[in-house]
Image (tube, helix red, strand yellow):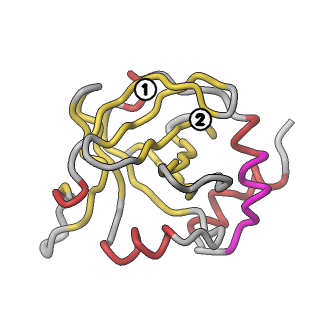
Amino acid sequence: MATRLEDNLLKLVSEGQHVDADEVTALYDRLPPVSVQELLGDWQGLAIQTGHKDIETLDSIGWVGKTFHSPNEVDPVIVLSPDGKRVANGEWGAARIYEVRFRGIISAAMVYDQLPIIDHFRRLEDNVLIGVMDKKGACGDFGMAFILRRI
């Protein structure tokens, strides 16, 4: 049974409206896992505006998504070049995809090669995922949540 947040989340995110972090956490915990192969390809990203402190960081660099070339080759931070093309932001390095247990479920996760960050993914609907950025040292923090939509 879909919840009100589940039905309206994409609209709220696309409009940049605030979404309660506890509601996002509860929704995420109900969602099914994603396989490594399902992540392959290009994804548009949008932060879920929960008030998390890391949203400002991604906004300041112009984050627009991720590109999963293969399980061992991921561009975790895609930005737009001056001419509007999707390009990797090299300052954030590269990443790989693994299956990882997070909040009791084994699902695909993206592990940054050079940063203490793991992005965990669950399926909201076909070609739409919710991700959670899990940073080392952010104990007690659910993490910054975001939407990925396949493009």
Q: Secondary structure at mark 1?
A: helix
User: Can you tell which mark lies on residue 38?
Assistant: 1
Q: Nearer the viewer, residue 127 or 63?
A: 63
Q: Give me the residue at 69% from left, 34% from top.
A: 31
Q: Which residue is mark 2?
A: 123
The correct choice, above or below, for 44 with respect to 95 in the image is below
Find residue 50 and report its image quarter: bottom right
Q: Please give left or right for residue 151 compared with residue 49 in the image.
A: left
Q: Give me the residue at 60% from left, 26% from top.
A: 33
Q: Please give left or right for residue 56 compared with residue 4 in the image.
A: left
Residue 110 image offset from top left, x and y in percent? 39, 37
Asked whether the beta carbons under mark 2 and mark 1 sit within 8 Å of each other, the answer is yes
Which of the two labelled residues, at mark 2 and mark 1, occupies the earlier sequence position? 1
Q: Which residues are magenta?
A: 18-26
Q: Please give left or right for residue 107 compared with residue 68 in the image.
A: right
The correct choice, above or below, for 15 with respect to 124 in the image is below
Q: Give me the residue at 19% from left, 55% from top.
A: 88
Q: Residues within 10 Å of mark 1 (few under 14, many from 20)?
A: few
Examine the structure image and report whether residue 58 is included in the region drawn in magenta: no
Prevailing SS of the magenta stretch = helix
Disc 2 from disc 1: Cα separation: 10 Å
Residue 69 image offset from top left, x and y in percent? 23, 33
Q: Nearer the viewer, residue 109 or 82?
A: 109
User: Can you tell which mark lies on residue 144?
Assistant: none
Residue 112 image offset from top left, x and y in percent? 32, 43
Report the amino acid beneath label 1: Glu
